[in-house]
Image (cartoon, rainbow, N blue to C red):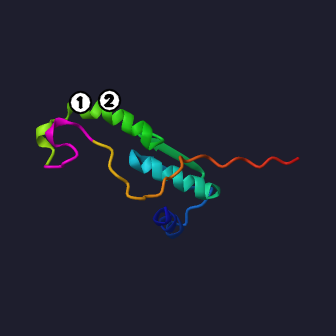
């Protein structure tokens, strides 16, 4: 995200002229940028992506994996033998909560 911010600054873009486009995985990154720097964007365009990893995993298992050749796993032990992918051990990796848009402040 910070790289996008550096490019925005270098190009002199601001809320009046900065549209951010995210394609596929870049769509998730664009959402993260927009949640952090929404006041600097005129618009956000996302294309051809899922808004979360659980949805992508469901898609991959239902659509992509049935068409994969188990003999071409490249020796990956998680795939070898036609057993499909297994959930990897995360070894203490922190869990990341799903992205949520910030709530708007309401004046009383």
Q: What mark, if any, has residue 62 been given in the picture?
A: 2
Please give the range of residues in magenta.
Answer: 75-85
Mark 1 is surrounded, within 10 Å at the Cα level, by few (under 14), some (14 to 19) or many (20 or more) other residues, namely few
Locate residue 3, reporting x and y percent.
46, 66
Q: What mark, if any, has residue 66 been given in the picture?
A: 1
Q: Residue at x 53, y 56 (%)?
A: 33
In this rendering, the answer to whether 108 lies above or below 13 is above
CB atoms of marks 2 and 1 within 8 Å? yes
Q: Is residue 13 visible?
A: yes
Q: Secondary structure at mark 2?
A: helix
Locate residue 4, reporting x and y percent.
48, 62
Locate residue 12, reporting x and y percent.
55, 66
**What whole-number distance in Å separates the C-alpha atoms at marks 2 and 1?**
7 Å
Q: Residue at x 20, y 43 (%)?
A: 79
In this rendering, the answer to whether 69 lies above or below 93 is above
Q: Is residue 20 visible?
A: no
Q: Secondary structure at mark 1?
A: helix
Left or right: 37 in relation to 20: right
């Amino acid at each position: 995200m910070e790289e996008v911010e550096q490019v925005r600054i270098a190009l002199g873009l601001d809320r009046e002229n900065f549209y951010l486009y995210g394609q596929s995985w870049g769509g998730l990154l664009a959402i993260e940028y927009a949640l952090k720097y929404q006041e600097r964007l005129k618009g956000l365009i996302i294309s051809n992506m899922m808004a979360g990893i659980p949805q992508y995993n469901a898609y991959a298992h239902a659509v992509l994996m049935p068409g994969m050749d188990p003999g071409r796993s490249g020796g990956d032990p998680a795939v070898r033998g036609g057993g499909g992918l297994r959930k990897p051990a995360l070894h203490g990796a922190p869990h990341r909560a799903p992205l949520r848009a910030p709530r708007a402040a309401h004046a009383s």
